[in-house]
Image (tube, grey):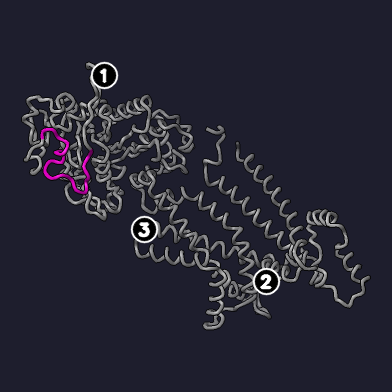
Amino acid sequence: MGFSRYLLKRLVYAFIVVFVIMTFNFAIFRLMPGDATKMIIDPTFTPEAIAELRRQFGLDDPPLVQYFKYIGNLFKFDMGLSFSTRRPVVNELKERLPNTIVLFLTSFIFTTIIGISVGIYTASKRGTFGDNFVTGAGLFAYAVPAFWIQLLLLMLFGYYIPILPIHGTMSAPPPDGFFLQFLDRIHHLILPAGSNVLVAFGSWALYTRNTMLEALGQDYIVTARAKGLEENVVLRHHALRSVLPPIVTLIFGALPGMVSGAVITETIFSWHGVGKYLMDAVMMQDYPAAQGAFYLIALAVVICNLAADIVYGIVDPRIRVGEGGAK
Amino acid sequence: MALLEVRDLKMYYKTLRGYVKAVDSVSFDIEKGKALGIAGESGCGKTSMAVTILRLLPSNGKIHGGSVKLDGVDIVKLDDEEFRKSIRWKKISMVFQGAMNALNPVHRVGDQIVEAILAHEDVSHAEAVKRAEDLLDMVGINPKRFREYPHEFSGGMKQRVVIAMALACNPDLIIADEPTTALDVMVQSQVLKAMEDLRKRLDLSMMLITHDLSVIAQTCDDIAIMYAGKIVEYGNVIDIYDHPMHPYGMGLVNSFPNIKAERTRVRSLPGFPPNLLAPPEGCRFHPRCPLADDICMEEEPKLIEIGSNSHKVACHKVDMLERGVDIWAQ
């Protein structure tokens, strides 16, 4: 099986998963208790007006017709109008997506870099004070709930030492000039992204440390040392390189969790992103908005998984079977 | 002066229950172009000795004395950085039990050889690649397979790659630790033959560690038999095969069936190797030795030369053995 066939198979699976998600997405919000229309329909409306509104939002169609309309529209990136704002959901999501991506990527990049570096460091200094301290700290951060640490940080840096903004993606009104705006955004980013890194780096560090320790006990590490390579080269080129496949799997496997974690982080820090949008939409029974946000997040999860499969094939030569076929 | 002179080498592992004396006052020489076989049961300190010479010790293993002179220079005294640069692979390389895990699964086999060359010699990458290809060719592997990964090779081929890698920097001495143990008999003989040819051609010295006496008989000039961290018998291969003088050496040779002799029961050695945390007092072999008496339990025998050909034995009862008594007969 060549790499392209492997890739094709993954793509087909991903497509099927997306379709199933779309279907669930449709069903879940309609099975939730409560009536969506009450958010926009005033009790004083005449029955005719109510019927007209239901017709406008397509709620008077039988469920199956609603379903097919919904699927068809999704392919056209038409997610309907938000019940609460009466604006197209797509536009609202487009507005918020960059914010979420910025927060997500910043957290992700710093978490992996810090986590993996700490893991390598502790593995190479096994049994020392530094190793024990970092391992303990990582375990603690991993064990406590993320929102609790986030609330504490909010209290610490927003109230006791008020040096960081406690909500939003930028100041209102924003400062003048591109550079100042940029700095302002980073200022707002520190707390949410930093708290994400703080709660997540531990598991990466511990996982990297354990796989590194296992790799360092392998015969080929002794070979590498015997060859007279520098310890640094042995660590990075031989040990780390050989544990990269499982670490990459972990990285991409953790992405979905980080995406869903974004809902909580964004809500706590009032981050103007997709996660908070989803939260608000669910609270207000805004079907189209919630469906849209939910769909986007699920799509992100599927893409992350697909990326994991592809990257795994690249980093592990045993999966990327060569020209000669399986041997 | 011999190429490698090991004197009174001691290496202990520190454990929670005390020191494990894995290598205890070991002395031997390897002449230029000669091969020394180290034989003994599992756990007698053979591999520990190899890793002591290359200083590949785990963090709890420490050299507690003795010297290892290579061309007259005591390499135990070199600092780590100098040792890494000037000794490892450059002067002394090692053939590991490569059929299993000695090659890194995520790097191309050729690159693993190139890496060894580049770590020690100031040559261009292209030149190192050329040399690695020549080395592969020399051990009978098509240089076209340079860019393949270890999992695409058979066990015997991987072992030959490991040998090619050991030759990469033209070392003076190769330490081969159970180089053929994981291979089947056919492949084993191919690999051994390849190793012997190369060794003769390049005039290399070798230290061959194995528990398989037939492998030593086939390839080595001298043999050292280790028991519980010590050398108990040391000398020319033929001498020791024909006239083993230490009760343990005798037992080892006896436990190997002779294909040309009359069919007899293969005789195994009774008992187990001792715990190296608390080795027996006196002669370490005395609990398993049929000749043991009071002196064996109290006094440690020295490795002394007997007869000719520098055949050395560490046994109090050596005169009895010289008279040819079959001590292992019931």
Q: Residue tagged by mark 3? A: A126
Residue depicted at 35% across the width and 37% down the height? B97
Give the left or right position of residue B247, taking residue B155 as reference: left
Real-space Cα separation, disc 2 to disc 3, in angstroms = 43 Å
Tell me the quadrant of the picture where the N terminus of chain A can be found: top right
Q: Residues within 10 Å of mark 2 (few under 14, many from 20)?
A: many
Label 1 residue SS: loop
Chain for numbered disc 1: B
Label whose residue precedes the other's in the sequence (2 or 3): 3
Evaluate if marks 2 and 1 touch, with contact meaning CB atoms under 8 Å apart: no
Q: Are marks 1 and 3 on the same chain?
A: no
Magenta region, main secondary structure? loop
Q: Amino acid at mark 1?
A: Ile
> Is the residue at mark 2 from the same chain as the one at mark 1?
no
Label 2 is found on which chain of the structure? A
Q: Which range is magenta?
A: B272-291
Q: Residue furthest right?
A: A48
The residue depicted at 56 percent of the width and 75 percent of the height is A151
How many marks do you count on the picture? 3
Q: Which residue is mark 2?
A: A272
Horizontal and vertical percent position of residue B290: 13, 33
The residue carrying mark 1 is B259
Q: Is residue B322 left or right of residue B42?
A: left
Image position, residue B125 (x, y; %): 43, 43
Residue A169 falls inside the magenta stretch: no
Tag nearer the camera, 1 or 3 = 1
What amino acid type should be assigned to the residue bearing mark 2?
A: His
